[in-house]
Image (cartoon, rainbow, N blue to C red):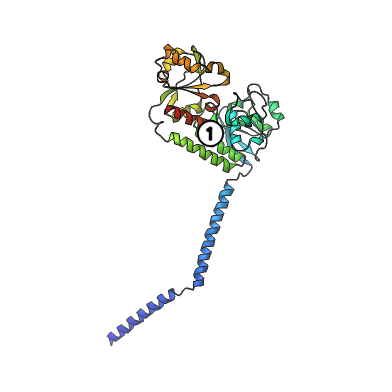
Amino acid sequence: MKKLFNIALSTCVSLALVGCATASNNTSPSSTVAETSSSVAESTSLAESSIADEKKSSETVYPVSITTYDADGKEITQVFEKAPERIITNNLSSTEMLIDLGLQDKIVGMLNPDNEVTGDYADAIAAIPHIGDKKSVSKEVVLSNNPDMIIGRNMMFSDKSLGTIAAWNENSIPVYTQKASVSNMKQSIENVIEDIRNIGIIFNVQEKANAYADELEKKINAVSSSDKNSGELKNALIMCAYNDSTFGAYKSALQESILNTLGYTNVATGTSDLTLENLVTMAPEVIIYVTSDRNKDLDTNAVELMKNNTVLSDVPAIANDKIMTISYDEFMDYGTSSVKALEDINTFLNK
């Protein structure tokens, strides 16, 4: 009897389990479709929300605060209540960056370039009003153009030059100085990229500015990704105004960082009235000769004179024909031309 009871119990349990399984598999098809549709709709909604948030994040919300630098290299904050419409630029590189970002029509004036502008920017620069020389332009002339922003090299914003940033702020005019132009800080060509992104924020053209910055960053990385900047730096000299007796040199933080990226350092011991003895002592392995309008007469024969001067025959750069010429505006300014200079110098070094 006990055996029969156990069999009956086992049968009941088995039937119950089958019943449970059957019940769990009898979910209504319409219910499943509804749940799936709800899940898809929710995912679509989240994706659309994410895209909207991403688009929104690329839009500048005014007023916007931007960190920049005064003439002494001290960090200061500038507030932009709206996207500027009337801009004054104090150097070529800031003008070129605005042109690259499609903001040329907002430039109401620029200080005279140091050299005749040629190449891709020539027509655009010629169309912009030139309001005076950087050494003599008056604050009154700048104000007469009713700017709502001034941008350019930080050293220009002093009492001895264009006027302090504080003074312009008193006239409700914010200023942005290029981080890449600050000489008393450790520089990096990456600061040019940061300047572009900041300009994108100020003018609410972030999408275009970030795309351009990303493009330039790829070019920088293509050069600096090698091991050139590892180990001891080699000697280079940034030279100008050679006349077979004396010469000049440039010493600048951004240009030093470009050389460092390529595994070199600038060995210039001064900037003017250097002698042939100085050149022999420096023993540069590479000479980067910078041409400019002010030294045009000297620049024409400078390289040939160096090569033919027996006093310099043992200078490594001259003995190994490692003298490169490059224009002042490409190498010595503080904007996107610096990236091209990096590429061009790298190409020359790898010949």
Along the horizontal axis of the image, is 309 left or right of 169?
left
Q: Position of residue 313 (x, y in %)?
A: 41, 14
Q: Does dot 1 land on a helix, a strand or a loop?
A: helix
In this view, the residue in front, 114 or 61, is 114
In this view, the residue in front, 277 or 129, is 129
In this view, the residue in front, 263 or 136, is 263
Is any atom of residue 153 visible in this view?
no
Is any atom of residue 321 visible in this view?
yes
Above/below status of 28 relative to 329: below
Quarter of the image with the C terminus is top left
Choose top left, top right, bottom left or bottom right for residue 87. Answer: top right
Q: Position of residue 121 (x, y in %)?
A: 60, 31
Along the horizontal axis of the image, is 8 left or right of 253?
left
Choose top left, top right, bottom left or bottom right for residue 100. Answer: top right
Q: Position of residue 11 (x, y in %)?
A: 34, 82
Choose top left, top right, bottom left or bottom right for residue 201. Answer: top right
Along the horizontal axis of the image, is 125 left or right of 44?
right
Please name the amino acid that badge 1 sits on. Val
In this view, the residue in front, 224 or 186, is 224
Q: How many marks?
A: 1
Seen at 54% across and 53% down, the residue is 50
Few, some or many C-alpha atoms within 10 Å of disc 1 (few <14, some 14-19, many ≥20)? many
Quarter of the image with the N terminus is bottom left
Seen at 58% across and 52% down, the residue is 52
Residue farthest to the bottom, as pictured: 1
Above/below status of 44 relative to 325: below
Seen at 35% across and 79% down, the residue is 14
User: Which residue is under mark 1?
Assistant: 192
Q: Position of residue 222 (x, y in %)?
A: 45, 36
